[in-house]
Image (spheres, rainbow, N blue to C red):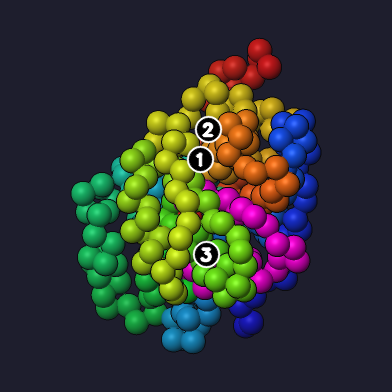
Amino acid sequence: MDISLDIYSPTQPIESKLFADKGIKVFIKRDDLIHPIISGNKWRKLKYVLQQAQAQNKTHLVTFGGAYSNHLLATAAAAAKFGFKATGIVRGEEVENDTLFLCKLHGMQLIFTDRESYRDKQALFNKFFADNGQAFFIDEGGASAEGAKGCSELVDELTETYDHIFCACGTGTTAAGVINGIAKNNLPTQFNAIPVFKNGEFMKVEIDRFLTAPANYSLHLDYHFGGYGKTTPELINFIKQFVVDTGILIEPIYTGKMLYAIFDLAAKGHFTPGSKILAIHSGGIWGLLGMKDKFNRDLADF
Ligand SMILES: *Cc1c(COP(=O)(O)O)cnc(C)c1O
């Protein structure tokens, strides 16, 4: 079977009085529209990984994630679509939630593991699959050089040149791929990474692992909102306003933080008037399923 998807990821303007006042233009690349479940950067990261599995005649994908992992869900759906078996090794004690429900619905087997064992992914893989010649290891979050290669193709699709590109970072694979794509296409674009973790300086090491050549880019460390999976009422209110104003769904774990950063930097005069800025909508809106209570708390007064 040919492992590919027809990519539908248009670039659309984001209208806002703030951007008009500052004389900047902001666009969003809708990678969230690539697939309803294998969305955004998760498909881009999986594409060459699955092709590699297929080339090695592996039929069983084994990967890792937290209980709300978009990567687990994307892998489950991609496995179903392209005819693989899939096992997800899930961090933490056994739970049920909407994400894992969807993983199981796509046929993924789940193995829950304590946080201590979870640290050593290769050891876990060996523990359960050492004797299974069909099993294929995919790292947490799809972090890999193949993943970065898939993400670099996002840049090949651009038909205009931007002064800035912004992307949220978890493993840094998507950022690395986009930076590689900027270099490959000889673009004058400044890349801006928004780590979604507290103390995100370490993201530079993570990104640099997958760069094809050393590159300069900006890390904005102040948009973590307390850390991974953490939010504040300010972020939640920003997301609600953004969704109402644009009709584009975003979530608090990744894309909400990245877009908040663009609005905040614009308000602070960070961008030269005339700048063109591209936000990457890396998908992941299923992450909202784990955050419903955060929204419900004050949806009433919105
Ligand atoms: C997984 C995810 C990311 C993080 O991508 P990395 O390549 O791991 O840095 C960013 N945005 C969304 C929506 C995601 O689901």
Q: Are circles 2 and 1 on residues that touch, CB within 8 Å?
A: yes
| Quarter holding residue 21 | top right
Q: Give the range drawn in magenta.
A: 147-169
Q: In this view, does 155 lie above or below 273?
A: below
- Element carrying mark 2: loop
Say which of 165 and 117 sits in front: 165
Location of mark 2 (residue):
291
Q: Residue at x 54, y 56 (%)?
A: 191
Q: Is residue 200 left or right of residue 258?
A: left
Q: Residues within 10 Å of mark 3 (few under 14, many from 20)?
A: many
Q: Where is residue 196 in the image (x, y as percent from the top left)?
A: 45, 43
The amino acid type, in three-letter code, at marker 2 is Met
Secondary structure state at the residue bearing disc 3? helix
Of badges 3 and 2, nearer the viewer stands 3
Question: Quick check: marks 3 and 1 in contact, CB under 8 Å?
Answer: no
**Residue at mark 1: C-beta within 8 A of ligand 1:** yes
Residue 46 visible in rendering: no
Residue 54 is situated, as x and y percent measured from the top left of the image, at 50, 82
Which residue position is annotated with label 1? 253
In this rendering, is residue 270 above or below 133? Answer: above
Labels 3 and 2: the sequence-earlier one: 3
Q: Is residue 156 left or right of residue 246?
A: left
The disc label shown at residue 179, or none = 3
Q: Does the magenta stretch include residue 276?
A: no
Along the viewing direction, whichever of 176 and 227 lies nearer the viewer:
176
- Of mark 2 and mark 1, the one earlier in the sequence is 1
Q: Where is 260 relative to 169, above or below?
A: above
Nearer the observer: mark 3 or 1; the answer is 3
x, y percent for residue 262: 60, 40
